[in-house]
Amino acid sequence: MTGDHHIGWLGTGRLGSAMATRLLAHGTMLTVWNRTAPKAGPLIGMGATRAAVVGDLGRCDIVFTTVTSSSDLLSVTAGPGGLFRAQPAPRIVVDCSTVSAEAAAEVRAEAAKRGIAFLSAPVSGNADMVAQGRGSIIVSGAATTFETVQPYLRAIAPNVNYCGTGEAARLTKLCHNLLLGMVSEALAEVTTLAEKGGVAPSAFLDFIDDSVLGSTFIRHMGQAIRARNYAPTSTTENLCKDFDLGFAAARQLEVPMPVAATTHQLIQTAIGHGHGKSDFAVLYEVAARAAALPRTKR
């Protein structure tokens, strides 16, 4: 048993379901709600309680939110019929979404008006990695609130870091996702170069995995490239959204990002070729096409 709080979960997409599943595995009492109710079915089957409406989560001590966009977060929290308007309202809300700092700050301010503590806690790692216990979480907000929530965060992911107040975690995660995209594009390009020179992608990627450059992420992306399997864990469209948010922060802070800007155009190229719903490892296919490599399995 992780703790004695009643936990609510709002948003049961791929990532949200993987995170909530880990809480259930630790014996946490969990109530879940999702806009598309059937998506919560697997969690109900594992012992969670279904909330009929968002307001039912107000009876929970702590509510986690995992949504796709800034507008979604504003809608399900501060909007009409949203979580903050529940009677009673939850004591603490923990948002694990990757949204704009502006949207998160607006939600944080609305929460403060209603006496609700708010943490930003975005996640590094796709749903599969989280399910395997290999996720990481970066958190910002009041330190006392973090201490209350920390046991549940550590049940979800073994690596949990606190980085300060306000939206520091949100900026940290955007920087993380920008780097993720740049590394993805770099790996796609060098794999293509090696391949056009006669080196099998599997041989090149095996070498990288065993070198000082090897990492959990590069191994994961390399597996997709080897198999040319782009079933989405995180889509090219979502990566593009994160780049848009990252550039908004860079403009505000007056930070030039030429490498990220080039990568953004290549991500947009992948979307233009019809790969928006594919895993962003599909950047390799775009690089291979640009190099005039054959499209047969290699």
Image (cartoon, rainbow, N blue to C red):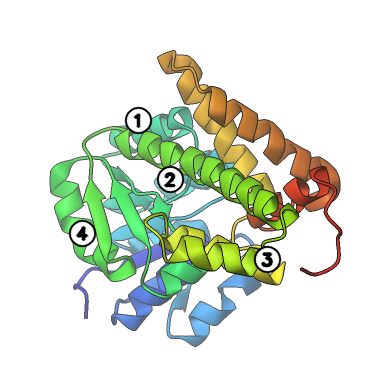
Q: Residues within 10 Å of mark 3 (few under 14, many from 20)?
A: some
**For the residues marked 1 and 3, what is the alpha-carbon distance in whole angstroms?**
53 Å
Nearer the camera: disc 4 or disc 3: 3
Please provide percent x and percent y for residue 54: 50, 57
Please provide percent x and percent y for residue 3: 19, 72
**95 and 260: which one is in front?**
260
Residue lying at 76% horizontally and 44% vertically, measured from the top left: 270
Asked if residue 196 lies left or right of residue 36, the reply is: right
> Looking at numbered disc 4 in the image, what kind of residue is underneath it?
Gln
In the image as oriented, which residue stretches furthest toward the top? 254
* Relative vertical location of residue 159 with respect to residue 255 in this rendering, above or below: below
> Looking at numbered disc 2 in the image, what kind of residue is underneath it?
Arg
> Looking at numbered disc 1 in the image, what kind of residue is underneath it?
Ala
Where does label 1 land, which residue?
Answer: 109
Q: Residues within 10 Å of mark 4 (few under 14, many from 20)?
A: some
> Looking at numbered disc 3 in the image, what kind of residue is underneath it?
Ala
Q: Earlier in the sequence, mark 2 or mark 3?
A: 2
Q: Is residue 75 visible?
A: no
Where does label 4 land, which residue?
Answer: 150
User: Which image quadrant: the C terminus?
Assistant: bottom right
* Relative vertical location of residue 249 with respect to residue 290 in this rendering, above or below: above
**For the residues marked 2 and 3, what is the alpha-carbon distance in whole angstroms?**
57 Å
Residue lying at 52% horizontally and 47% vertically, measured from the top left: 76
Q: Which mark is residue 85?
A: 2
Please provide percent x and percent y for residue 37: 62, 69
Where does label 3 land, which residue?
Answer: 200
Q: Secondary structure at mark 3?
A: loop
